């Protein structure tokens, strides 16, 4: 049954266009999203006070929906700080130094290791865990610093982050906006992520080797001393203690993966398992390393982690708040103000689009790739992927199928363009360590 489109539907479309336009110009969209929420609330209720309240309620709703994701990333970052401070990361990574004997082995070893670590620690903490230890080794083996940065970006911010199979922060955002289960997005993204990863990493390696043979790129050993500067606090742990934690940390996360597989844990359950494990590791390392100061140090690490988490998701919350209005979030944020036969703003628009313009799977795929790439132009990779999910839902309704695949496609395009792979990341610390080693 086709619902007659109301002013609410058209306002939603106009603000989607405005958000895309601002992203093309690489401008922040927070104010645009807030204006959209306010105007939709005002038109729906006819009450100025209700419209103003809707802004706050939409933010609260978005934070509630994203809280588990923000928490797990914050906790993992806090835990990763303990690994780098105590030098456990050095011991964890040191066995892989033996594999790095030439530029080719350096590129693939660092890349694959970065991908695996990023699945569990997220890419930014993985840079700190991996970069300082293996960068000097790779340069001595003849791989230019730019080659190290390419490997870490493509495998970490490209393959690992665009799929985000373990922590599931990216598919959480896109699946919520599309109104489909998170596991559907993860399953649909697996072939897309790995095809994208195989093509890009091999192509990058080819061009890297070509430029090295031409003498355009060379390994500059002058930066090794700066990279090897000690940041580890001495005397915290003995070598045997570091070795113990270097073994037990990967084993615990491997046990989590096994539990997810055996118990069929997905979504929030999988996130909770990873988060709980990270908290236990954080507590164990902090209390062992700092002894009497362990209680205070644990709190400090958590504060640092939460600062990182909300810094990453700060730009995401207003955008997510707007796009939650397109689905079930409308009634929870504003109330029962949609037409009685409405299936949600996005579904209504999709049905209307299907009746106006004949769409094909190819058109939907190209459109979602373009929308995803546009959302990544601001350089964060995450801030606009809710838009990709919402547009995917709209096109899937119009086409009649393919919601998960279109959502995954938009997610991958957004993160590969804006996650630090094609467009430089906004994370200044990351740029200092990797992009300009």
Image (tube, rainbow, N blue to C red):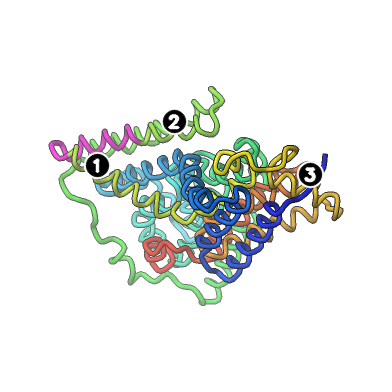
Number of marks in the rendered image: 3
Which residue matches tag 1? 299
Residue 389, visible in the rendered structure = yes
Q: Is residue 392 left or right of residue 431?
A: right
Q: Is residue 34 left or right of residue 206?
A: left
Q: Position of residue 376 (x, y in %)?
A: 57, 61
Q: Quadrant of the C terminus?
A: bottom left
Return the residue found at the far front.
Answer: 47
Residue 317, visible in the rendered structure = no
Q: Quadrant of the N terminus?
A: top right
Q: Which mark is residue 3?
A: 3
Magenta stretch: dominant secondary structure: helix
Task: Report the residue at 34% width, 47% height from top.
Answer: 305
Q: CA distance from mark 2 to mark 1?
A: 21 Å
Classify mark 1: helix, strand or loop.
helix
Q: Position of residue 53 (x, y in %)?
A: 48, 48
Q: Earlier in the sequence, mark 3 or mark 1?
A: 3
Q: Earlier in the sequence, mark 2 or mark 3?
A: 3
Task: Report the residue at 34% width, 57% height from top.
Answer: 132
Front one among 185 and 431: 185
Task: Report the residue at 33% width, 72% height from top.
Answer: 222
Label 2: how many Cα within 10 Å (few below 14, some 14–19, many 20+): some
Which residue matches tag 2? 273
Q: Which residues are magenta?
A: 279-293
Task: Report the residue at 44% width, 41% height from top.
Answer: 67
């Amino acid at each position: 049954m086709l619902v007659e489109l109301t002013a609410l539907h058209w306002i939603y479309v106009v603000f989607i266009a405005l958000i895309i336009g601002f992203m093309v110009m690489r401008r922040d969209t927070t104010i645009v999203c807030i204006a959209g929420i306010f105007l939709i609330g005002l038109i729906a209720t006819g009450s100025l006070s209700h419209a103003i309240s809707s802004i706050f309620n939409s933010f609260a709703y978005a934070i509630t929906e994203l809280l588990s994701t923000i928490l797990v990333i914050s906790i993992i970052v806090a835990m990763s700080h303990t690994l780098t401070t105590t030098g456990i990361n050095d011991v964890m990574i040191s066995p892989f130094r033996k594999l790095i004997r030439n530029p080719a082995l350096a590129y693939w070893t660092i890349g694959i290791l970065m991908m695996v670590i990023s699945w569990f620690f997220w890419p930014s903490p993985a840079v700190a865990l991996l970069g300082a230890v293996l960068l000097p080794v790779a340069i001595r083996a003849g791989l230019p610093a730019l080659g190290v940065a390419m490997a870490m970006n493509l495998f970490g911010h490209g393959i690992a982050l665009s799929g985000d199979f373990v922590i599931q922060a990216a598919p959480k955002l896109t699946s919520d906006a599309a109104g489909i289960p998170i596991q559907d997005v993860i399953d649909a993204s697996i072939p897309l992520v790995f095809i994208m990863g195989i093509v890009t990493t091999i192509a990058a390696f080819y061009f890297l080797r070509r430029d090295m043979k031409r003498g355009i790129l060379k390994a500059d050993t002058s930066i090794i001393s700066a990279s090897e500067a000690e940041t580890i606090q001495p005397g915290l742990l003995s070598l045997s203690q570091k070795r113990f934690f270097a073994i037990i940390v990967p084993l615990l996360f491997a046990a989590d993966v096994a539990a997810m597989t055996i118990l069929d844990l997905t979504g929030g359950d999988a996130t909770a398992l990873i988060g709980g494990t990270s908290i236990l590791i954080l507590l164990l390392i902090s209390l062992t390393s700092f002894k009497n100061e362990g209680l205070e140090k644990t709190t400090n690490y958590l504060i640092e982690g939460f600062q990182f988490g909300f810094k990453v998701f700060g730009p995401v919350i207003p955008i997510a708040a707007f796009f939650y209005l397109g689905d079930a979030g409308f009634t929870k944020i504003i109330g029962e103000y949609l037409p009685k036969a409405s299936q949600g703003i996005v579904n209504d628009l999709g049905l209307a689009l299907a009746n106006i313009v004949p769409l094909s799977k190819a058109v939907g795929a190209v459109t979602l790739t373009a929308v995803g790439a546009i959302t990544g132009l601001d350089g964060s990779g995450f801030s606009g992927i809710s838009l990709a999910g919402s547009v995917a839902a709209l096109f899937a309704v119009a086409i009649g199928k393919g919601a998960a695949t279109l959502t995954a496609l938009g997610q991958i395009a957004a993160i590969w363009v804006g996650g630090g792979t094609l467009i430089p990341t906004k994370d200044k610390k990351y740029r200092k360590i990797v992009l300009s080693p």
